[in-house]
Amino acid sequence: MVKPRPKYLNLFQIRLPVPGWVSILHRASGAVLFLLLPLILYLFQLSLDSAPGFDAMKGALGHPLMKLVLIGLLWAYLHHLCAGIRHLALDLDYGTELPAARASARAVLVVSLALTLVAGVWLW
Amino acid sequence: MVRREVVGARYGVRDWLAQRVTAVVMAVYTLLVLAVFVSVPVVDYWHWKSLWELAVMRYATVLFLLSLYLHAWIGVRNIFMDYIQDPGLRLTLYTIVIAALMSYAVWSVQILWGV
């Protein structure tokens, strides 16, 4: 028997619950961090290379566009970290009930955004 | 004869555990480095350089980076497992990612000990 289940395969129609958002953003932020690894390593190398290299790195990071990239990177790191800590707690069977899982998912979103905001203001 | 796929989910628990152990290593390192940067002022190149000449910074960072690369490998591999259905393309992407991460590992050691 074929059950007439609704199928929402249109990405714009899918309504994800909060833990779903945290989950997909965990994956997306991880992918972004992976893709930006060479840039981070290059800047790190430049900063340790020589005094002019250090200044060049500082100059590069002083550009507003680069600052935006850096803030985006910071958010990706913080979200991935917070969602990861939540993941470890779930693995240890803490907060697996629906209300707790929803609350912790909301906390991950809020805390990582708040920390990004603080670091972003300091960076700017 | 048993036909085996070259790609597939066969590594289960080992990778699951590695993902978590490396995550804890990175989380601890993040807090430590944050504490260092807050307490040690980096005003110019010489402060920055002397900070990275400390053995503890080098070894902690190389441990962090190697954890990161293993963690990234498992994570990226999981993404490919979910979205890339064609075995040939998946294997190609795996090869590229492994080669990239291994080069990053060598590069990292070079950066840290080349100071």
Image (cartoon, rainbow, N blue to C red):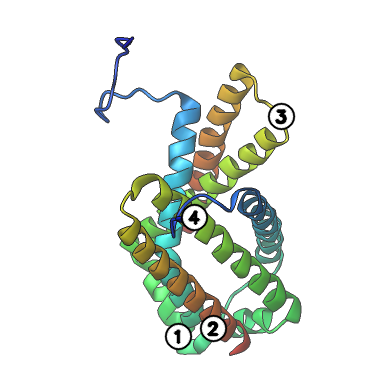
Where disc 1 sits, the SS reads helix
Q: CA distance from mark 1 to mark 4?
A: 56 Å
Q: Residue at x 71, y 29 (%)?
A: A94
Q: Residue at x 45, y 88 (%)?
A: A52
> Residue A50, relative to residue A77: is it above or below?
below
**Chain letter behind tag 4:** B
Tell me which amino acid carries mark 4: Val
The reply to whether callout 1 and callout 4 are in contact (CB within 8 Å) is: no
Where is residue A10 shown, x and y percent of the image? 24, 28
Q: Quadrant of the C terminus of chain A?
A: bottom left
> Residue B54, relative to residue A89: is it above or below?
below
User: On residue B6, which mark appears?
Assistant: none
Q: Residue at x 44, y 77 (%)?
A: A42
The residue mark sitting in front, 1 or 4, is: 4
Mark 1 crowd level (few <14, some 14–19, many ≥20, 10 Å Cα): some
Q: Which residue is mark 3?
A: A94
